[in-house]
Amino acid sequence: MENANNQLMEIIMSLIMHGGDAKSNAMEAIHAAKTGNFTISENKLKDANNALIKAHKSQTSLLTQEASGDSVELSLLMIHGQDHLMNAITFKDIAEEIVDLYKFTSHN
């Protein structure tokens, strides 16, 4: 039982960590675009996407476990991890639009 709890905690912390990394990279992409450095901006958006892929893998493992009939214990940390992931996805999507806007205005 303790091993299962440790594994669940690792998955939750992975959601939090990779979600946070994705959001931070998206913010750095915006800052780079704001100064006209679109190469860095694009690289940071790629880093954000890579962090989201890692977070999604963690989330998928939880969903697979739940779908197989092995219920996952709901906790405040679990909710926090899911919240981090959703916010990171939304922030990354908005960052992509902001970067595109900076690119557009720099060419006009």
Image (spheres, grey):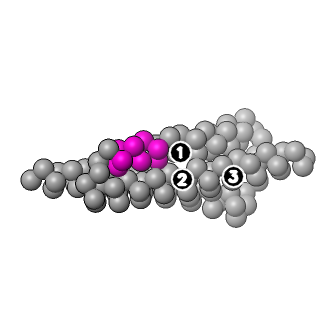
Q: Position of residue 63 (x, y in %)?
A: 65, 41
Mark 1 touches mark 2? (CB < 8 Å): yes
Q: Amino acid at mark 2?
A: Asp
Q: Which residue is mark 1?
A: 51
Q: Which residue is mark 2?
A: 21
| 43 part of magenta stretch | yes
Q: Secondary structure at mark 3?
A: helix
Residue drawn at x 58%, y 45% is 55
**Most foreground residue, 91 or 64:** 91
The quadrant in which residue 101 appears is bottom left
Q: Secondary structure at mark 2?
A: helix
Q: Is residue 72 visible?
A: no
Residue drawn at x 70%, y 47% is 11
Q: Counting residues from the N terminus, which is met first, the one under dot 2 or under dot 3? A: 3
**Most foreground residue, 23 or 43:** 43
Q: Counting residues from the N terminus, which is met first, the one under dot 3 or under dot 1? A: 3
Q: Is residue 102 left or right of residue 84?
A: left
Q: From which residue to which does the magenta span run?
A: 40-48
Q: Is residue 9 left or right of residue 22?
A: right
